[in-house]
Amino acid sequence: MPRPSRKLELPHPGPVVGVDEAGRGPLAGPVVAAAVVLPEKGVPRGIDDSKKLTAIARAELHARLTKIALVGVGVASVEEIDRINIFWATMLAMTRAVEALGIAPGMVLIDGNAKPRWDHPCVTIVGGDALCLSIAAASVVAKHHRDQLMIAADAEHPGYGWASNKGYGCPTHREALNRLGPTPLHRRSFAPVAQALLPL
């Protein structure tokens, strides 16, 4: 099966920034975006869509990418998700990730079909994390960063299984949500959480 390549980066002026997010679907926790500018040489092997990699592989690639690439991370909080909705919170996280790079991008390549309201030149690529190396790198960084946030949150709010489910609405998380009630990290604008808040 083909891996992401740099073919989609080549037609564009540099620096080319790959952007992806993690955490649009969970019931709890922030949404995280990453922006990555890969070096011309020395890119680690094995970079792929983060969903295809193990947690160990993502952690190893994250450690190497933060050493050899220019990396920016942006986070939109649960409060922001509930206030402006998950779509615009994702766009906000992407904007913060690109701003965190501290450079003017020549081109931003974004996974998906939507882009933030900004002045940066950009191209959206559906399935970009499986096609474009810099987007795949961003997916690894975003996923690893968010997973670490949720593992830490699990220690503060035990019982929901966030260390394993990372806040997604699996049966054990939903059962705990109904039994224990929502935490401050639950997205109250999401239906399962809102339903858990309703009086019996």
Image: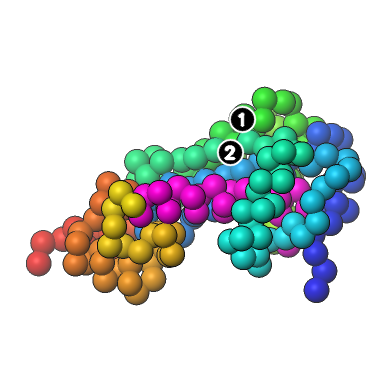
Q: Is residue 75 visible?
A: yes
Residue 117 seen by the camera: no
| Residue 44 pos. (x, y %) | 79, 51
Disc 1 marks which residue? 100
Dominant SS of magenta comes to: helix
Question: Of the residues shown, which amino acid type is indicated by label 2?
Answer: Val
Q: Secondary structure at mark 2?
A: strand
Relative side of 128 to 96, left or right: right
Tell me which residue sits at (20%, 59%) in the image.
181
Q: Determine which of the numbered discs, if any, sits on residue 73 in the image.
A: 2
Which circle marks residue 154 in the picture? none
User: Mark 2 and mark 1: span between their CA atoms?
Assistant: 6 Å
Residue drawn at 89 percent across, 43 percent down:
41
- CB contact under 8 Å: marks 2 and 1: yes
Q: Residue furthest left?
A: 200
The residue under the point 62% across, 29% down is: 99
Residue 34 position in % (x across, y down): 61, 43
How far across and down, in percent of the image, does residue 84 sit? 40, 42
* Res. 199 image quadrant: bottom left
158 left or right of 1 in image: left
The percent position of residue 160, horizontal first and vertical second, equals 31, 62
- The amino acid type of the residue labelled 1 equals Ala
Over which residues does the magenta segment extend? Answer: 130-154
